[in-house]
Amino acid sequence: MRLVFHGHSCIEVQLNNGKVLLVDPWIIGNPQSDINLNFKCDAILVTHGHKHHSGDMVALSQLNNAPIIGMSELVYYAEQNGAPAGHAMDLGGQWQFDFGTIKTTHAQHSSSLIVGGQPIYMGEACGFLIMADNQVVYIAGDTSNYGDMTLFGKAYNIDVAVLPIGDNYTMGPKAAASAAQRVHAKYVIPVHYNTFTDIQQDPEAFAALLPAGVAKILTPGEGFNIPTETN
């Protein structure tokens, strides 16, 4: 499995069978994005409704005929606004897809989308455990550091954790380092930082809080091949 960072919190998951998942597809207006709406994917995972995570989910879903996977309210909204049939889930739920298994996890965050100047409720915020190719990737979504992450670390052999470090809206570097320890991730990819003035962070300072080699700091367009020998 290979993970590619596309700016802010947008992560591409390339599976060994050639299928591509795209997580939190904010492209248009994303100053860090290295891709455009011609991006090809087989499924779209969205952690919550905020525009800088869900912004291009409907357009990409339409162009690729790709299902949107996420919380029920978010998927319903997307379908009502032109997206093809998606797959609605709820917190703690798990489903076997043709590309692997996805389990939703709690994320301590809000979830809405501004429509016509008013916030529209988009369900609870969530994270995802993606289990495919005999590997496990934990996409935390926008969240704080919370105790149940310890349970994920005990129940799943997590290869990579994708964690926000920006602070203000999510956990900051110190809390994210603690979360990495909770989930016992072999590798950690920091996201959700330096996109806006109020989430400026030094990823190298975050990396220094973890054992050497654990943090994988990616620039937009850069990928990380998850070593198979870690399982």
Image (cartoon, rainbow, N blue to C red):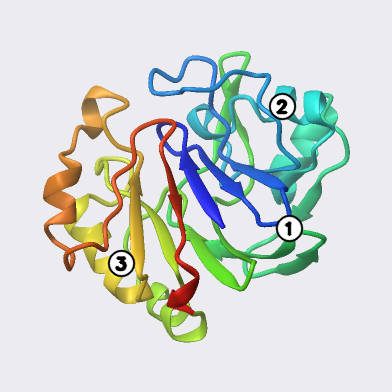
* Marked residue nearer the N-terminal end (3 or 2): 2
Question: Residue 103 in the image: x percent, y percent?
Answer: 64, 67
Tag 3: amino acid: Ala
Badge 2: how crowded within 10 Å, few (<14), some, or many (20+)? many
Give the secondary structure at mark 1.
strand
Q: Is residue 61 left or right of residue 103?
A: right
Name which residue lies at 46% across and 72% down: 158
Give left or right: position of 12 versus 151. right
Q: In front here: 198 or 163?
A: 163
Residue 78: image quadrant is: top right
Q: Which mark lies nearer to you, 2 or 1?
A: 2
Within 10 Å of the Cα at label 3, are there few (<14), some (14-19), or many (20+) other Cα atoms? many
Disc 1 designates what residue?
Answer: 89
Residue found farthest to the right: 85
Three-letter amino acid code at disc 1?
Met
Q: Is residue 159 left or right of residue 113?
A: left
Of the numbered discs in the image, which one, if any, rests on residue 60? Answer: 2
Residue 180 — which label? 3
Marks 2/1: CA–CA distance: 20 Å
